[in-house]
Image (spheres, helix red, strand yellow):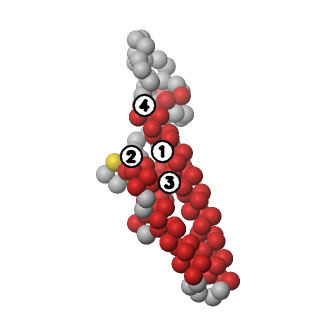
Amino acid sequence: SSGYGESITYSGGQASEGQGGFYGSGGARVSKIETEHKPEMMALAADVENLTLVMQEMCKLEEMLEEEKEGNSGVTGKSLEISSKIKKIMTSSDVMDCLNRLEVEGEPVWGLSSEERDLVHAARQKVNEC
């Protein structure tokens, strides 16, 4: 029989939305002084959004590539064109910079949801394949 005081629990939610967290979510550690917004958090959200759009585009291109390969039993000019487009997008400086901001030492930055972490892992894997 264990008491409530023996375990640390996480209450869920995103700390940036004022809910969840191990401590501070109740406002105990919230600054009483009005502070400027955190631009790095905004950049992080924009990076996640951009990466989401890029990966959605990758899914579409990969579906097209599969259809092209199946329909023509092998490599065609169009399949090479699609493969080239995938590589060009995934290795572009915009995507690489975005991905680099979302990773620290090869791992997704702290504070991402599990879905966002999976997105970062999938994007890095796709870049490594290119």
Between circles 3 and 1, the one closer to the viewer is 1
Question: Would residue 60 appear left or right of 111 to someone viewing this image?
Answer: right
Give, as a three-letter code, the residue at label 2.
Answer: Arg
Return the residue found at the far right.
71
- Residue 9 drawn above or below residue 66: above
Q: Earlier in the sequence, mark 1 or mark 4?
A: 4
How many numbered marks have been drawn onto this rendered protein structure?
4
The span from disc 2 to disc 1 (Cα, nearest Å) is 8 Å
Q: Earlier in the sequence, mark 4 or mark 3?
A: 4
Crowd around label 2: few <14 · some 14–19 · many ≥20 (10 Å): some
Q: Which residue is drawn at 31% across and 51% down?
A: 105
Q: Which of marks 4 and 2 is nearer the N terminus?
A: 4
Verify CB contact (< 8 Å) between mark 2 and mark 1: yes
Verify CB contact (< 8 Å) between mark 3 and mark 1: no
Q: What element carries label 4?
A: helix
Q: Which of 84 and 112 is in front in this view?
A: 84
Verify CB contact (< 8 Å) between mark 1 and mark 4: no
Can you see residue 126?
no
Crowd around label 4: few <14 · some 14–19 · many ≥20 (10 Å): few
Q: Mark 3 points at which residue?
A: 118
Q: Which mark is residue 47?
A: 1
Q: Name the residue under label 4.
A: 39
Image location of residue 60, percent across then percent down: 63, 64
The span from disc 3 to disc 1 (Cα, nearest Å) is 14 Å
Image location of residue 122, percent across then percent down: 49, 59
Q: Name the residue under label 2.
A: 101
